[in-house]
Image (cartoon, rainbow, N blue to C red):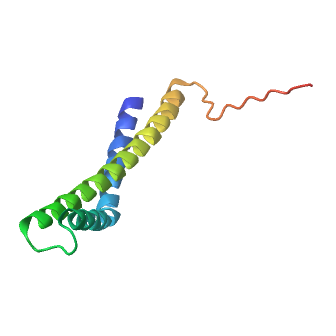
Amino acid sequence: MKKTISKTGLYMGIGAGLVLFVISGLLPGSFIGGSVGVQIAKNVFGGTIESSLLPRLIVGISMFSGIVASGLFLLMFTSSLGWLSGYSIGYIIDALHSGRTVEIMKKEATVDSN
């Protein structure tokens, strides 16, 4: 039971990550990657950038790497968050089906008498 619910949470996290990536990761990733690519092309070719193939290729590759980095970060974060929440919910549901009690927050306190 835990495995199916944790897989469901994982898939829901991946779906949420894809939506977040399309809404808030695609455009900023390309902007940040493009500005890094422009700076790299300026440093490599010096001064102003000509409109030749190699500077455009550097900017394009850096834009693509910015998009990939943004997507990986958002997808890994949301999928792990979904998996963890699905795993904990699956643990609670599995314990309820088997009739056990579940301690969610177990706190112990020690008192020093000195």
Give left or right: position of 83 versus 88.
Answer: left
Residue 80 visible from this viewpoint? yes
Rendered image quadrant of residue 23: bottom left
Q: Nearer the viewer, residue 37 or 82?
A: 37
Q: Nearer the viewer, residue 67 or 84?
A: 67
Give left or right: position of 106 versus 73.
Answer: right
Give left or right: position of 113 versus 2.
Answer: right
Rendered image quadrant of residue 114: top right
- Residue 36 in the image: state x and y as whole percent: 28, 63
Residue 1 visible from this viewpoint? no
- Residue 26 in the image: state x and y as whole percent: 28, 63
- Residue 78 in the image: state x and y as whole percent: 39, 49
Give left or right: position of 15 versus 109.
Answer: left
Q: Residue at x 45, y 39 (%)?
A: 84
Q: Which residue is at the far right?
A: 114
Q: Residue at x 30, y 49 (%)?
A: 72
Q: Nearer the viewer, residue 62 or 68?
A: 62
Q: Is residue 107 above or below residue 26?
A: above
Please state, as top left, top right, bottom left or bottom right, where the N terminus lies in the image. Answer: top left
Q: Is residue 48 above or below residue 76?
A: below
Q: Nearer the viewer, residue 50 or 103?
A: 50
Q: Residue at x 32, y 62 (%)?
A: 25
